[in-house]
Amino acid sequence: MEEIELVLGDITRQRVDVVVTAANESLLGGGGVDGAVHRAAGPRLARAGAELAPCAPGQAVATPAFDLAAVRHVIHTVGPVWEGGGHGEDEVLAACYVHSLRLAAGLGARSIAFPAIATGVYGFPVRRAAEIATRAIRSSSPSVATIRLVAFDRETHDAIAVTLGEDRGRSVP
Ligand code: APR
């Protein structure tokens, strides 16, 4: 079982081959992590995104990382807006991770950093999202060697840490 790294920090500071951003369907950028990634990558990111838009929830598309230092590609994925849990939100969120990993593997990426997709503006409960993310990553048995979850705040970090710890506990024979 591959190790999933967890860090508390800014995803635009990660030295990885691929940075994943939590986008919206227009791929033109926005607030939150998407705003930070677009600011760091520069205006060419939105222009490249506009050529690939719209991106449906659960789907993922890749562009160059442009001015984002030390990063080769940005993968834009659109999370589900939380509507209470009865509208397939879990499946869409899982698809964000699976499709992003599949795309990164196809690009020959050796490392990838994910934000806590959908847990900000889109309102997805943090702990539930962490469980879905770790389960989706593990079930896709990715060929990407380094998978890093980047939490921007302590609450998100601790929710993911608990989930990772529980998962490891379950996985120990
Ligand atoms: N590095 C890492 N994580 C970050 C950063 C950053 N620089 N900035 C914010 N985050 C975290 C948030 O704290 C949250 O935990 O990213 C997580 C996802 O939150 P959002 O960025 O709000 O993303 P999401 O909930 O998926 O909403 C997407 O918001 O910004 C718009 O264009 C975006 O319409 C889309 C929507």
Image: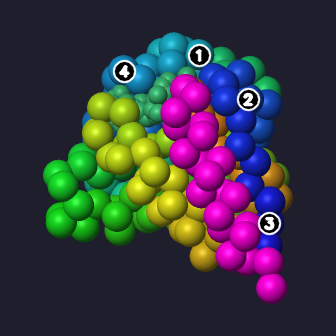
The mark found on residue 14 in the picture is: 2
Label 3 to label 4: alpha-carbon separation: 32 Å
Which contiguous range is marked in magenta?
153-173
Report the mark closest to the observer, 3 or 2: 3
Question: Could you tell which of marks 3 and 4 lies nearer the N-terminus?
Answer: 3
Please tell me whether mark 3 sits on a helix, a strand or a loop: loop
At horizontal 56% and vertical 68% (from top left) the residue drawn is 135
The residue at label 4 has a CB less than 8 Å from ligand 1: yes
Question: Label for residue 112?
Answer: none
**Residue at the spot of label 1:** 40
Q: Nearer the viewer, mark 1 or mark 2?
A: 2
Where the C terminus falls, by quadrant?
bottom right
**Sequence order check, earlier mark of 1 and 4:** 4
How dense is the environment of label 1, judged by Cα within 10 Å: few (below 14), some, or many (20 and up)? some
Residue at coordinates 80% horizontally, 60% vertically from top-left? Answer: 3
- Mark 1 or mark 3, whichever is nearer to me: 3
Question: Closest to the observer: 121 or 37?
Answer: 121
Q: Could you tell me if residue 149 is visible in this image?
A: yes
Dot 4 amino acid type: Gly
